[in-house]
Image: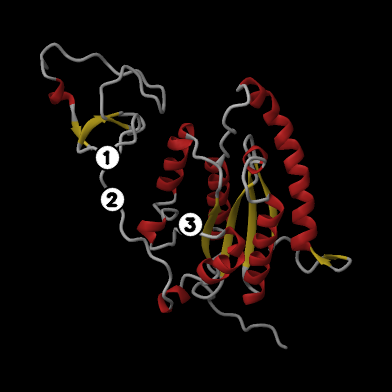
Amino acid sequence: MPSAPSKLYSDDVSLLVVTLDTNPFFWSTFSFPFSEFLSHVLAFLNSILLLSQLNQVVVIATGCNSCTYLYDSSSDKNHGSTTGSMPSLYSDLLHNLEVFLAKDQHLAKPRDNAAGGGAPPPSLLSGSLSMALCYIQRAFRSGPIHPQPRILCLQGSADGPEQYVAIMNSIFSAQHSTASYITGGIYYRPPHLDGLFQYFSTVFATDLHSRAFLRLPKSVGVDFRASCFCHKQTIDMGYVCSVCLSIFCEHHDKCSTCGSVFGQAQSNVPSSTDRKRKA
């Protein structure tokens, strides 16, 4: 079979960057085993590469202390290489994952012991998201012809409030390209974990151009009213941190998100309602 003719592939060729939650402390307490989850992910990634010989897949591990690239299908080392009967997608990715997990878990032990066996530490989604954006920017600058990039975040561990500023900075840096609602992307929470591969292949495998012809899950609606960071309640009026834009329903002396110290109320402003700003 002859190779595909040269043309602009920006519409039908995908660059899929996957951020993979590998937090060992989360998976040790979760009912769904990590090995089974990984088998669904590998099958999905393999199907993406089989859809087109020009598709690219990049996998980034999201640990609790660090992040790293696990696999890049465009690398000369991974292109067409095999280990016996096992393709590089499996052999290289699994090897790199094993090395990363050992290192990340070792780094997390002191902090986990200091926490007294409480809730597992959150994964560094902000770090893996930043690495994904950097990779996409590098692809953009490699030449005028490049595939359409998209990021798939596979996240299971709880959110880390301390990463709020970093994640928002990543979204602003990407000009909202990672916010699924703004860009017309897909946010989906699978109701049955046993069918992860089916959800991956039917919801997330299609490229951006083909999605216009399919009936994919859509959110019922997004409530754009602000929620306070202190009680997680929806509010109409509140206090806004001028540094990180965190919102609070009550006046605080210090921002719990970025640590900025708020100034004292001015003497010529007797009412607390005058200090409120619309959220």
Q: Position of residue 15 (x, y in %)?
A: 57, 64
Instruction: Confirm or deny contact between disc 1 and disc 3 (CB under 8 A).
Output: no
Q: Residue at x 77, y 46 (%)?
A: 98
Q: Mark 1: few, some, or many residues within 10 Å (few <14, many ≥20)?
A: some
Q: Residue furthest bottom?
A: 1
Q: Is residue 124 above or below residue 197?
A: above
Circle 1/circle 2 CB separation < 8 Å: yes
Q: Is residue 225 above or below residue 266?
A: below
Instruction: Residue under label 1, please give it.
Output: 234
- Pointer 2 with pointer 3, Cβ within 8 A: no
Label ID, residue 189: 3
Residue identified by numbered label 2: 223
**Residue drawn at (75%, 36%) of the image:** 103
| Mark 1 to mark 2 CA distance (whole Å) | 9 Å
* Residue at image location 75% in from the left, 66% down from the top: 79
Q: Is residue 66 left or right of residue 211?
A: right
